[in-house]
Structures are given as C-alpha cells and as structure tokens.
Image (cartoon, helix red, strand yellow):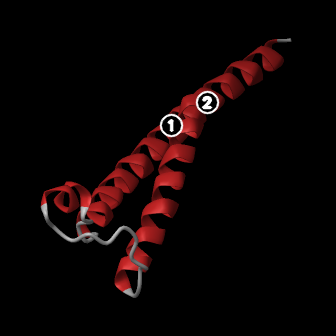
Amino acid sequence: MLSHLVESRLLRYTLTEYFRMMSSIFSIIQIILAVILIVVVLLQQKGSGLGAAFGGSGTVYTTRRGVDKVLFQATIVISILFFLIALINLVV
C-alpha cells in the first residue's frame, strides 16, 4: 500500500514537472516564432495601400515573384505555426 502511494505521488510529481517543462518549451518556441514573423513582415515590400488614392501607383494587383513570393509564403506558414503553438500552449 505504501509503495503504491509513493509511486502515485512520484508519477504525479513527474507529470506536473513534464507539463511545466512543455509549457516553457512552447512559450520559448512562440517567442521565437513571433520574432521571426515580425522580421518577415518587415522585410516585405510596401504595397500601394493609400498611396494609390493620393496619386501614387494605380496598380490593383501585382504578381509576386522571387523573394517577395517566398516572404509572402513564409509569412503565412509562420503565422499558422504561431497560432497552432498558441493553441497548444493554452491546452498544456
């Protein structure tokens, strides 16, 4: 009986520590993804935005090529990963 009680406390302690460690790892991954996402967004070229309304470039749609396309796709992938890690971090 005593050995069972000791084993259950040990298991509970290790599971608690395991979840605490996983939460810390997910938080670190989330911070790294946030920094990478900020850098990727800042590296993208500026669009016409409100500039077209005030006499700027009037193009509505331009195709993305080269580095701009890679940065655009990287932004999508990193933002999805960031969102999933945030959801996992809520559960853990």
Q: Which mark is residue 91?
A: 2
Q: Tell me what residue is drawn at x 63 percent, y 32 percent.
A: 14
- The picture quadrant where one finds residue 8 is top right
Q: Tell me what residue is drawn at x 36 percent, y 67 percent.
A: 60
Q: Which residue is mark 1?
A: 23
Q: Amino acid at mark 1?
A: Ser
Camera-nearest residue between 73 and 26: 73
Quadrant that contains the C terminus? top right
The spot of residue 66 in percent (x, y) is: 39, 88
Q: Is residue 16 above or below residue 51?
A: above
Q: Most extreme residue toward the top, as rendered? A: 1
Q: Is residue 40 above or below residue 21?
A: below
Q: Which mark is residue 9?
A: none
The spot of residue 59 in percent (x, y) is: 31, 72
- The picture quadrant where one finds residue 12 is top right
Q: Is residue 12 left or right of residue 41?
A: right
Q: Tell me what residue is drawn at x 53 percent, y 53 percent.
A: 80
Q: Amino acid at mark 2?
A: Val
Q: Tell me what residue is drawn at x 24 percent, y 65 percent.
A: 48
Q: Are marks 2 and 1 in contact (CB under 8 Å)?
A: no
